[in-house]
Image (cartoon, helix red, strand yellow):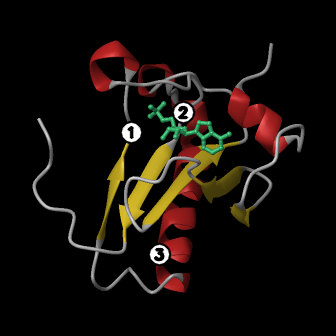
Amino acid sequence: MSTLFTKIINREIPASIVYETDKVIAFNDIDPQAPVHILVVPKKEIPTLNDIEPKDSEYLMEMYSAIKEITRDLKIAEDGYRVITNCNSHGGQEVFHLHFHILGGKPLGALLV
Ligand code: AMP
């Protein structure tokens, strides 16, 4: 069964898509935790950070390129932002399809522990 994010990639579920290439998609988080809260997702079902393999390097590089382009376009790159990946239960991961959260648009304060 495909993941929630693959359903978004395949347009089976609507999302507010802000960026897309053949390897990566990015869309607004449905429950934003900051003025900017965007998810950057590879178009490959890599469940968690633990599952990344060397052959996935192109996806990872494109995810970082997406972050660079999106934050520049939204004019938050210079002030700064935070990128988070939650992994498994202690990390609070809910969707088991690798993704980066881009958070920004205001001072984010200290990292929660
Ligand atoms: P994580 O807890 O790191 O797995 O993050 C999953 C994120 O997906 C959460 O921030 C959710 O708010 C977000 N989310 C869940 N469903 C959707 C959806 N349909 N569209 C956009 N974001 C979603």
- As measured in the structure, the alpha-carbon distance from the residue carrying label 2 to the one carrying label 3 is 20 Å
The residue under label 3 is 71
Residue drawn at the location 37% of the way across and 80% of the way down:
77
Quarter of the rendering occupied by the C terminus: top left
Determine whether the residue tagged by mark 3 lies in a helix, strand or loop. Answer: helix
Seen in the image, is 110 located left or right of residue 63? left
Q: Residue furthest front?
A: 31
The residue under label 2 is 98
Question: Percent from the top left, x then y, of residue 73?
Answer: 55, 84
The residue under label 1 is 85
- As measured in the structure, the alpha-carbon distance from the residue carrying label 3 to the one carrying label 1 is 17 Å
Amino acid under label 3? Thr
In the rendered image, the vertical position of residue 90 relative to residue 80, given as above or below: above
Amino acid under label 2? Leu
Quarter of the rendering occupied by the N terminus: top right
Seen in the image, is 75 located left or right of residue 47? left
Closer-to-camera residue (72/94): 94
Determine whether the residue tagged by mark 1 lies in a helix, strand or loop. Answer: loop
Closer-to-camera residue (107/98): 107
Residue drawn at the location 74% of the way across and 61% of the way down:
20
Question: Percent from the top left, x then y, of residue 82?
Answer: 30, 59
Closer-to-camera residue (68/38): 38
Q: Are marks 1 and 2 in contact (CB under 8 Å)?
A: yes
The answer to whether the residue bearing label 1 lies less than 8 angstroms from the nearest atom of ligand 1 is yes
Question: Is residue 44 in view?
Answer: no
In the rendered image, the vertical position of residue 59 relative to residue 35, given as above or below: above
Q: Which mark is residue 48?
A: none
Residue drawn at the location 68% of the way across and 27% of the way down:
45
